[in-house]
């Protein structure tokens, strides 16, 4: 059985999130949560909450029949979302653009074969 969770419009660069996502891809859920707990990057906290949400979705969809210890991160993908464009005033009447990027994160958990 597979369960999914999506995190949309996270105000963080997809490049920063994909570094954290690469750490846990293919790992068991318990190991992935331990890795995220001790990862000092800011992107680790939202991804940790997303993994916990996917575990809750798995137990809810299976009505408690799924064994949480056998779940692993089957796929995790980070996509770019809408970019907010702003301008910062500079010297002599000029302006420089600022791009505030955001991201979508999708995770799929599956049960490992016994």
Image (cartoon, rainbow, N blue to C red):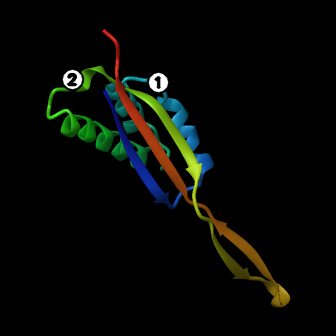
Q: Is residue 110 left or right of residue 81?
A: left
Which residue is more in the foreground, 35 or 57?
57
Which residue is more in the foreground, 31 or 3?
3
What residue do we see at 16% from left, 27% from top? 65
Residue 57: give x, y in percent of width and height: 26, 41
- The residue where tag 1 is placed is 26
Tell me the crowding category of disc 1: few under 14, some 14 to 19, or many 20 or more residues within 10 angstroms, Cα based.
some
What residue do we see at 24% from left, 40% from top? 56
- The residue where tag 2 is placed is 67
Which residue is more in the foreground, 99 or 93?
99
The quadrant in which the C terminus is found is top left
The quadrant in which the N terminus is found is top left
Q: Which residue sits furthest left? A: 64
Residue 91: give x, y in percent of width and height: 81, 85
Q: How many numbered tags mark residues here?
A: 2
Q: Determine the secondary structure under disc 1.
A: loop
Residue 64: give x, y in percent of width and height: 14, 31
What residue do we see at 37% from left, 38% from top? 37
Q: CA distance from mark 2 to mark 1?
A: 17 Å
Which residue is more in the foreground, 45 or 91?
45
Question: Which dot marks residue 66?
Answer: none
């Amino acid at each position: 059985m597979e369960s999914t969770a999506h995190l949309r419009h996270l105000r963080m660069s997809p490049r920063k999130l994909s570094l954290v996502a690469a750490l846990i891809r293919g790992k068991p859920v318990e190991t992935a949560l331990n890795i995220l707990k001790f990862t000092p990057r800011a992107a680790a906290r939202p991804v940790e909450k997303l993994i916990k949400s996917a575990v809750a979705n798995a137990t809810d969809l299976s009505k408690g029949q799924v064994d949480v210890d056998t779940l692993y991160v089957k796929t995790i993908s980070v996509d770019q979302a809408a970019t907010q464009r702003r301008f910062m005033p500079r010297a002599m009447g000029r302006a420089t653009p600022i791009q505030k990027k955001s991201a979508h994160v999708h995770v799929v958990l599956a049960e490992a074969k016994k």
